[in-house]
């Protein structure tokens, strides 16, 4: 059965009526939570849960829509909650619309296009009230709700699967970090230690920064401190190298790896050190080690953190036998593929499931909207 036929079967000859949001739900303001006692009831603002109190402002299934701030943060809440004045709650007419169906539909709406703020994003009740919501089979209220429930069930299946995969990925990452730290920890006296300057050849002198206005567009990766920043026409390196961030806030924040391998024809600017190793295992071993340790003692500057060449080459690294390095790298490579690779492993599976969810969401909620139809 094609996807279109599936939708036709679900609708079973029913029509679709588009109603303004105010016809199926009343948008209500939040309240100040100052003075409330601590408890177990979540307090929602535009950024999510802000705290917990012992009273609630609403206790029915609802869709929370930010009034100010992060206006694309939409929440579906089924249990009692308190909401502050930066986020609206919706008092939903459940005789016309299933609350979670409304939630899924609002998630497809481009709320930024409705922004009325002059600096800080803002949504007004008047603007939100005009959002057109598709109601299947309005001529048969009972069947209409049944269709909505089925649409919610299908979309819930995809979101639950994505959640399960994400939970699995987080567990794998913890497992990876555990084994990485265990494999890269050595008892004192069991292994020799060397400086990074002794283990790698530094090729920083070959780097050439090019300002964006002077770069010729091509297909050669142009690398900076945290990865590819552009693509250019020519190259200055050809081979396998390890790049290590030289400056930038990420040296301390570590939101992305500060050491990363590159291969093939590349261009590197002066924001990343370029290191050459004798073997793949040597390079990857050092990459894993640098990404696992605290580099703060080697970093200078606070406003603009910097890892200069002298400090980089003074980093002390455990130096087990080539065979042991290879064993460690083989194990960690497998974990990295599972937890980090965009082409395979769990991240790829999550990406595919998310695309599948979005496809079915748009299919199921993209109900026909005749140009001549006017909400009544």
Image: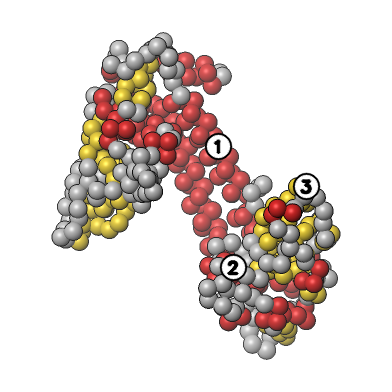
Residue located beneath label 1 in the image: 355
Q: Is residue 301 above or below residue 172?
A: below
Residue located beneath label 3 in the image: 218
Circle 3 SS class? strand
Residue 343 picture location, percent across and down: 67, 47
Name the colouring of the figure. Answer: secondary structure
Q: Are marks 1 and 3 in contact (CB under 8 Å)?
A: no
Who comes first in sequence, dot 1 or dot 2?
2
Name the residue furthest bottom.
189
Q: Quadrant of residue 201?
A: bottom right
Quadrant where the C terminus is found in the figure? top left
Residue located beneath label 2 in the image: 248
Quadrant where the N terminus is found in the figure? top right
Instruction: From the image, state whether disc 1 or disc 2 is nearer to you.
Output: 2
Q: Are marks 2 and 3 in contact (CB under 8 Å)?
A: no
| Residue drawn at point x = 36 percent, y = 35 percent | 103
The one nearer the camera, 13 or 362, is: 362
Residue 263 picture location, percent across and down: 78, 58
CA–CA distance between discs 2 and 3? 26 Å
Residue 18 lies left or right of residue 108; in this view the side is: left
Residue 26 picture location, percent across and down: 23, 32
Who comes first in sequence, dot 2 or dot 3?
3
Circle 1 SS class? helix
Q: Is residue 222 above or below residue 356?
A: below
């Amino acid at each position: 059965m094609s996807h279109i036929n599936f939708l036709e079967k679900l609708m079973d000859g029913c029509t679709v009526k588009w109603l303004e949001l105010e016809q199926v739900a009343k948008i209500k303001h939040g309240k100040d939570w100052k003075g409330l006692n601590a408890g177990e009831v979540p307090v929602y603002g535009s950024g999510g849960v802000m705290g917990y109190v012992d009273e609630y402002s609403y206790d029915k299934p609802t869709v929370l829509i930010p009034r100010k701030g992060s206006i694309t943060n939409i929440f579906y809440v089924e249990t009692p909650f308190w909401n502050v004045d930066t986020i609206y709650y919706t008092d939903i007419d459940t005789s016309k619309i299933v609350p979670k169906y409304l939630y899924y539909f609002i998630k497809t709406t481009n709320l930024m296009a409705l922004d009325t703020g002059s600096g800080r994003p803002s949504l007004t009740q008047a603007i939100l009230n005009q959002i057109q919501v598709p109601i299947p089979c309005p001529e048969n209220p009972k069947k209409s709700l049944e269709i909505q429930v089925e649409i919610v069930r299908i979309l819930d299946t995809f979101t639950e699967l994505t959640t399960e995969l994400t939970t699995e990925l987080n567990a794998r990452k913890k497992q990876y970090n555990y084994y990485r730290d265990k494999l890269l920890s050595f008892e004192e006296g069991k292994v020799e230690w060397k400086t990074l300057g002794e283990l790698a050849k530094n090729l920083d002198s070959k780097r050439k920064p090019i300002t964006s206005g002077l770069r010729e567009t091509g297909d050669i990766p142009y690398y900076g401190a945290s990865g590819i920043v552009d693509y250019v026409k020519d190259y200055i390196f050809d081979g396998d190298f390890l790049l290590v961030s030289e400056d930038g806030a990420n040296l301390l924040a570590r939101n992305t790896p500060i050491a990363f391998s590159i291969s093939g024809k590349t261009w590197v600017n002066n924001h990343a050190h370029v290191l050459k190793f004798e073997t793949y295992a040597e390079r990857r071993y050092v990459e894993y080690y640098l990404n696992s340790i605290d580099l703060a003692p080697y970093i200078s500057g606070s406003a603009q953190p910097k890892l200069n060449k002298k400090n980089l080459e003074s980093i002390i690294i455990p130096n087990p036998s080539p065979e042991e390095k290879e064993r460690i790298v083989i194990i960690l490579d497998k974990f990295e593929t599972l937890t980090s690779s965009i082409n395979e492993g769990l991240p790829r599976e999550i990406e595919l499931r998310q695309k599948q969810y979005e496809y079915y969401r748009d299919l199921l909620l993209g109900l026909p909207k005749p140009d001549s139809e006017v909400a009544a």
